[in-house]
Image: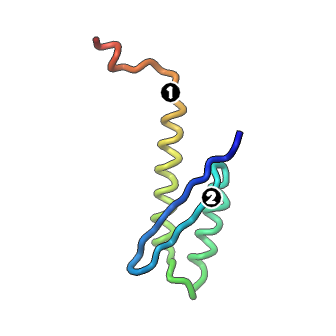
Amino acid sequence: MEATKKQLVLNKGGQQYIYRYESGCEGQLLDALVAVASDEKSGFDWFDAAVLSFKLSQTLMGQADELLYRDLPDPMQSLQ
């Protein structure tokens, strides 16, 4: 199975931070966010890392919900 390519984007002032990653490499993405936030020379700070980490968590939770509920019958159809 081929890994799905994804991206997270943060617009901050005039800067745009784009992180592209493959499905299954979320841990490496988090490591990259920590590395950039740790660099005092970058304009990317810990708050920015937290925002993107939160976005990543939301994405993963949505994917988990899809997996959990994809094989369940549609509750709206049972009402008809």
Q: Amino acid at mark 2?
A: Tyr
Q: Quadrant of the C terminus?
A: top left
Kindly state the secondary structure of the residue where label 2 is placed: strand
Q: Earlier in the sequence, mark 2 or mark 1?
A: 2
Residue drawn at x 50%, y 27% is: 70
Q: Residue furthest bottom?
A: 41
Could you classify mark 2 by the number of other residues whose Cα lies within 10 Å: few (under 14), some (14-19), or many (20 or more)?
A: some
Q: Quadrant of the N terminus?
A: top right
Is 24 placed above or below 32 here? Answer: above
Quadrant of the rendered image containing residue 11: bottom left
Residue to which mark 1 is pinned: 70
Kindly state the secondary structure of the residue where label 1 is placed: loop
Residue to which mark 2 is pinned: 21
Identify the mark at residue 51; answer none if there is no mark.
none
The image shows residue 63 at horizontal and vertical percentages of 52, 41
Q: Residue furthest left?
A: 80
Residue drawn at x 29%, y 14% is: 79
Could you classify mark 1 by the number of other residues whose Cα lies within 10 Å: few (under 14), some (14-19), or many (20 or more)?
A: few
Residue drawn at x 47%, y 42% is: 62
Q: Amino acid at mark 1?
A: Arg
The image shows residue 15 at horizontal and vertical percentages of 45, 78
Quadrant of the rendered image containing residue 31: bottom right
Horizontally, residue 72 falls left or right of residue 75, namely right
Horizontally, residue 38 falls left or right of residue 44, namely right
Horizontally, residue 3 falls left or right of residue 61, namely right
Residue drawn at x 49%, y 44% is: 61
The image shows residue 42 at horizontal and vertical percentages of 55, 83
